[in-house]
Image: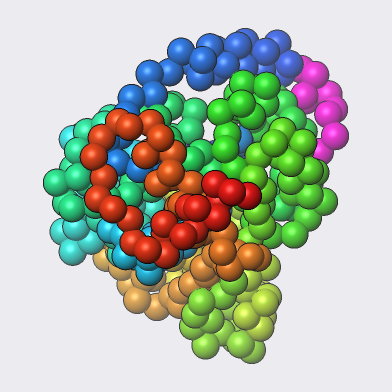
Amino acid sequence: MIRPRAPGFWFEPAGWQTALLAPAAMAYGRVAAKRLAEAPRRPAGMPLICIGNFTLGGGGKTPTAIALAKAARRLGLRPGFLTRGHGGAAPLPLLVDPERHGAGLVGDEALLLADEAPTAVTLVRAAGALLLRHAGCDLFLMDDGFQSAQLRPDVALLVVDGTRGLGNGRCFPAGPLRAPLSAQWPLADALLVVGPGAAGDAVLHRAKAEGKSAHRARLAIADDAGLSGARCLAFAGIADPAKFHRSLEEAGAVVEVRRDFPDHHPFGEADAAALLAEAEAKGLVPVTTAKDHARLRDAGPRARALAEAARVLHVELRFEEAGTPDAVIAAALSGFARRGEGSYPRPPADVSAASEAAASA
């Protein structure tokens, strides 16, 4: 599934486009709010952290999920990911095998997650949770799924981009909101603002006013692929290519050409041939994101040639306060224990300590 790029007016003061689409947004908002209110929220059988967004488009959910998985493993837990596999076409719930499954089947994000921990791809979240239990996982990290609310999270952590915030605060199609804020805030437990920005600051203040725990993080370069000083052709099919461009500048790359595509864009042979030809003609290094590179790997021969030629800029999420991931995980374990919905092995000592600290805060 290709997502069209978010229109610019979503992130500007309300204008004529917003007014024109207001009736449709009102109808959409009513349906979305009703769906949230009536969602089943079934027990997951293990502690569950939902990493979601208030809005359409990427806010940093996948890097957040990966960062929490790393923290969980450090604490002695066995995390697993639940995802619907955006951009993929898997007909049945399955555990992702990066050696056998391509982005066309399971989606690009699922491949990145599967490099970190067992990953279940399914539209039916309960079925994915069962797969993860059989895989030996004792903590579930659900990448997206806040609005569908098929499972009851022990912590619902909503991720917001610091630059974009909540946009114009209107529901789709007049704005980026997936549901009215009045329906979403009561179901959120915590907020994570990724990156600086006045828009993110405003959401952070709102979260504190709503009595939610609020945290900050940033995307940092994990591997610059030797791009410092390199003249580059940057191409990406992600929700906010500007993030990618800023990271390249931070790495010291000289971005001479930018080619942006819709989110989850399936690069065809014509796309790949054009990008390779332009990079060669202008003497530029093709560079892309890890998500885009994952989609190139199982495409046609020209796409695979582009994957081999391109350098990949890897980024990772770093929390402003080092104890944030431990506190989120501890809250999930405590929430699961309070619900009494299933048996759970005794948590590691450092998680128990973090849980007691979180409970007394």
Q: Quadrant of the N terminus?
A: top left
Which of these two is toward me, 246 or 201?
201
Q: Measured along the vertical axis of the image, is residue 80 above or below residue 157? A: below
Rendered image coloring scheme: rainbow
Residue 267, percent from left and from top? 40, 55
Q: Is residue 73 above or below residue 352?
A: below
- Say which residue appears at 54% left-offset and 46% top-offset: 359
Indicate yes or no whether the magenta region holds residue 24. Answer: no
> In the displayed structure, does residue 205 sit left or right of residue 140?
right
What's drawn in magenta, residue-wise? 12-20
Q: Is residue 205 left or right of residue 216?
A: right
Tell me the quarter of the picture where residue 144 sits.
Answer: top left
User: Residue at the spot x=77%, y=36% of the render?
Assistant: 209
Q: Image check: 151 left or right of 29?
A: left
In the image, 272 versus 336, the foreground residue is 336
Q: Is residue 221 visible?
A: yes
Q: Quadrant of residue 241?
A: bottom right
Q: Residue at x 43, y 44 (%)?
A: 334
How far from the left and from the top, in percent, is residue 300?
27, 60
Query: Picture coordinates of residue 219 (x, y %)?
Result: 60, 65
Q: Is residue 15 magenta?
A: yes
Q: Nearer the viewer, residue 295 or 187?
A: 187
Comparing 194 with 271, the one in front is 194
Residue 67 in percent (x, y) is at 46, 62
